[in-house]
Image (cartoon, helix red, strand yellow):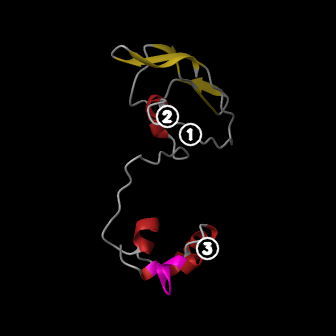
Amino acid sequence: MEDLTFAYYDKTILSHFNLNIKSGDKVLVIGPSGSGKSTLLEIIHGFLMPQSGQVTLEANNKVTNQSLTEFDSVSIIQQDPVIFNETIRFNVSFSNDPSHDQELMKLLDQLNLVEELGAQPLDLMI
């Protein structure tokens, strides 16, 4: 991103913003509400157009203005997540397939939720 400026009506969200993310980097965008996190990601994905500046991607040593919607390695976690009236297994993996239960249990353990959720936490209905 180079010299990116974006405003909603008369409120400037990003002003002359520059960012270079190298291939393979993982980036976490955090900040208070209204600071421009979602706006930045929507510009990167091509859902919003900046008033000035540009977003370019380098793929296979070729610079392109192609939006990130063409790439499967970029994700957005929405501010208002959807929770289904389903099991924890389904809400975490969008499937009730038990073949990944070991990985899901490891995730719940890393989040210190196994003890809190009780026996068979993956089958717990939300």
Q: Residue at x 44, y 30 (%)?
A: 39
In x, y percent, where is residue 111? 59, 67
Instruction: Decide if residue 18 is on the left or right side of residue 117.
Output: right
Does 114 sit above or below residue 71? below
Q: Residue at x 41, y 46 (%)?
A: 79
Q: CA distance from mark 2 to mark 1?
A: 7 Å
- 120 inside magenta stretch: yes
Span highlighted in magenta in the image: 116-122
Kind of residue at badge 3: Asp
Return the residue at label 1. Answer: 30
Query: Outermost residue toward the left?
Result: 85
| Closer-to-camera residue (116/55) | 116
Q: Say whether marks 3 and 2 touch (CB < 8 Å).
A: no
Q: Say whether marks 3 and 1 touch (CB < 8 Å).
A: no
Return the residue at label 3. Answer: 109
User: Which tag, 2 or 1, sits closer to the chain's start?
Assistant: 1
User: Which tag, 3 or 2, sits closer to the chain's start?
Assistant: 2
Kind of residue at badge 1: Ile
- Other-residue count near label 2 (Cα within 10 Å), few / some / many at <14 / 14–19 / ≥20: some
User: Which tag, 3 or 1, sits closer to the chain's start?
Assistant: 1
Mark number displayed over residue 37: 2
- Asked which quadrant contains residue 2, the reply is top right
- Other-residue count near label 1 (Cα within 10 Å), few / some / many at <14 / 14–19 / ≥20: few
Secondary structure under badge 2?
helix
Secondary structure under badge 1?
loop
- 107 inside magenta stretch: no
Q: Is residue 101 visible?
A: no
| Closer-to-camera residue (51/62) | 51
